[in-house]
Image (cartoon, helix red, strand yellow):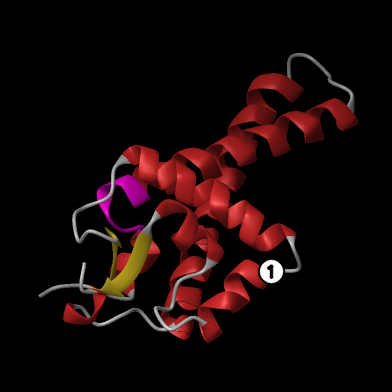
Amino acid sequence: MSNRSFGLGGYFSRLLSYVIDNIILYIISILIEILLFFQLAMPIPIVPAIGEHILSTIAMFIGVIYFTFFFGKGATPGMRIMNLELIKESGVSPTYLTGFVRYIGMLVSAFVFFLGYIWILIDGSNQGWHDKLAGTYIVKEKK
């Protein structure tokens, strides 16, 4: 793919889209936590440590589902707000498998002192490690 036929998404617009997505995920997690509190904690008192473990596990799965689904659709809500789009290196739309691989790559990118994200600043194609792993680009949305 000639990725230059598209305008590549810049670092700061990508960062802001990620922040927006995490705010959305935080709100979803709070709502689920409230629902679980009323469903689990009220009738059956649970040990706080177990409750926290359950909530963190649920939050993790929400993140996997959220990013896999929206990456598979070509853009997360945060990316849409920032007029960004996810495409495969070949120029085609991503699949849900691509979305899942990219999400796992995001965890790897963050795990090593966020070097996978910092890589976007020095890479000529504005790809982080997660983009390279999934074979994707973030581009400015086609109008």
Relative to 109, does residue 82 appear above or below in the rendering? below
Q: Nearer the viewer, residue 103 or 51?
A: 103
In this figure, which residue is indicated by the disc labeled 1? Answer: 114
Left or right: 14 in relation to 90: right
| Residue at horizontal 22 percent and vertical 58 percent from the top | 90
Residue at the limit of the structure toward the left, as seen here: 143
Q: Residues within 10 Å of mark 1 (few under 14, many from 20)?
A: some
Relative to 25, does residue 79 appear above or below in the rendering? below
Image coordinates for residue 54, horizontal then vertical, percent: 73, 29
Left or right: 66 in relation to 26: left
| Residue at horizontal 80 percent and vertical 35 percent from the top | 52
| Residue at horizontal 43 percent and vertical 71 percent from the top | 17
Image coordinates for residue 123, horizontal then vertical, percent: 49, 81
Residue type at tag 1:
Phe
Q: Quadrant of residue 66?
A: top left
Q: Quadrant of the C terminus?
A: bottom left
Residue 8 counted in the magenta span: no
Relative to 111, does residue 16 appear above or below in the rendering? below
Q: Nearer the viewer, residue 104 or 133?
A: 133
* Span of residues in magenta: 71-76
Q: Quadrant of the N terminus?
A: bottom left
Q: Quadrant of residue 112?
A: bottom right
Image coordinates for residue 136, horizontal then vertical, percent: 36, 60
| Residue at horizontal 72 percent and vertical 38 percent from the top | 56
Left or right: 61 in relation to 73: right
Q: Nearer the viewer, residue 46 or 121?
A: 121
Q: Helix or strand or loop: what does disc 1 sit on? A: loop
Left or right: 112 in relation to 4: right
Relative to 50, does residue 126 appear above or below in the rendering? below
Residue at the limit of the structure toward the top, as seen here: 44
Circle count: 1
Image coordinates for residue 8, horizontal then vertical, percent: 31, 80
